[in-house]
Amino acid sequence: MIDTQFPAGFIWGAATASYQIEGAWDQDGKSESIWDRFTHMPGKIVDGLTGDVACDHYHRWQDDVALMKEIGLQAYRFSVAWPRILPDGRGQINQPGIDFYSRLVDGLLAAGITPFITLYHWDLPQILQEEGGWASRTVSEAFAEYTDVITRALGDRVKHWMTLNEPFVSAYLGYELGFHAPGHTSREEHVAASFHLLLAHGLAVPVIRSNSPDAQVGIALNLSGQVPASSSLADRAAAWQSDGLNNRWYLDPLAGRGFPLDIIQLYGNPLEFIRPGDMDTIATPIDFLGVNYYTRKVVRSTIVPEAENAPREVFINSNLTDMDWEVCPEGLYNILGRLYFDYPFQNIYITENGAAYPDQIIANTRIDDPQRLAYLKSHFEAAHRAIAAGVPLRGYFVWSFLDNFEWAYGFTKRFGLTYVDYPTQRRILKSSAEWYRRVIAANAVID
Ligand code: FCB
């Protein structure tokens, strides 16, 4: 008797993003994105490589859909590259770009795989960066126009839409840390970008609904529990602040609560870019929340000197992935529970979860990845426990369907269920994918 049976109708899938897999960066009328610009600048990417070719999915999508079918995926989350659809960011439509995604959607449906589309997974048309990128309100308005074009074209067949992927990462890593495109280092731009991303989301929701009336609309946020390193007041305050920066800054406005006051105060930003009605736009109800979860964060106060703080009680366990991220399935259970108790979202999907490990090909034919399998298994079990506790979790997307271009890490990190040999573009299903196929078939966590 299997006691990790998932509810009937639970959706098992895998995810990717346009820039990380497509390649064809300058083909068929596509314009340059901020990631094309960024990766072509020296010193930005660990291995010096770019996503010019990546997994060449743009040309190999039919084989890739066949592989998805082989794994038994019920759903596939992918993103649309805005610069393929509107090379100028707005205005003139590039039909070959639309045709590519239209064929992909038809191919998925023919294979019995439900498409879940993310409208923005970080590849902003470079031309819109020239007007300030996400620090500028005009870009939120352009996003609504882009959303209109693509949902008009695909809204008849695609019924699950996410506006944005991880606005926190776009805004913070892109505009303040400079670790991601466009590589800026301004706190002010970060805060403005976070707002304009949320505004873009809010403007897009009714557009999607009007072009695809029975669609489910959501957003994918990166959420992780911020755990105090000790029970000292200083550590608890630091963890709460970290939660505000990472989680509440996005969750609260979406839930109609406005930006969290403690973080407004911390930023010391007058938020003058907010106009009357904007916070209501952002709070337009959504059908589901997408959760991208990888690890938790243990937070130690930097205000109280180490010697004066209470001794650490919480330690990062030594089980780390190749990203040096702590393996902590309990953190997934906790974040799901917290969402259930503190927020009004009626449906939740895990829109990303997975692990990078340095896979080795054996005898040129197979990849055994027991660590990835163990990672996924423990997180599936945590998700199952969350459902048993009442969390309305509807589906699970493993990151990622394919090994791919891992942003600033280039091709040095492999997250795929499918191994990609980049020089030949050969794909090989890893043993975790074979196992995942059996999980999907059983709709239960199996050994
Ligand atoms: C997330 C991104 C995704 C991938 C994973 C590892 O932050 O959304 O594109 O890079 O991390």
Image (cartoon, helix red, strand yellow):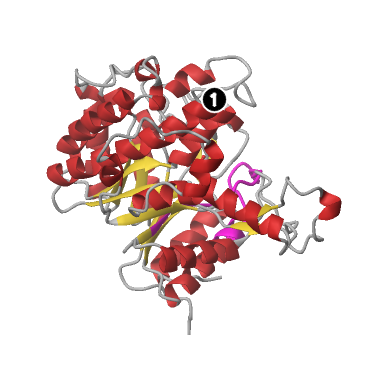
Q: Is residue 3 above or below residue 77?
A: below
Is residue 241 toward the left or the right of residue 10 in the image? right
Q: Is residue 198 above or below residue 218?
A: above
Q: Is residue 52 visible?
A: no
Badge 1 is on which residue?
186
The range drawn in magenta is: 349-376
Location of the C terminus by quadrant is bottom right
Magenta stretch containing residue 370, yes or no? yes
What's the residue at 51%, 53% (across, down)?
293
Q: Position of residue 351 (x, y in %)?
A: 42, 52
Closer-to-camera residue (185/270): 270
Q: Position of residue 101 (x, y in %)?
A: 26, 34
What's the residue at 50%, 54% (across, down)?
433
What's the residue at 58%, 45% (across, down)?
365
What's the residue at 69%, 46% (across, down)?
324
Among all residues in the image, which is located at the extreme bottom? 1
- Dividing the picture into quadrants, the one containing residue 271 is top left
Q: How many marks?
A: 1
Q: Is residue 361 above or below residue 150?
A: below
Q: 10 Å neighbourhood of mark 1: few (<14), some, or many (≥20)?
A: some
Magenta stretch containing residue 382, yes or no? no
Name which residue type carries label 1: Ser
Q: Position of residue 138 (x, y in %)?
A: 29, 24
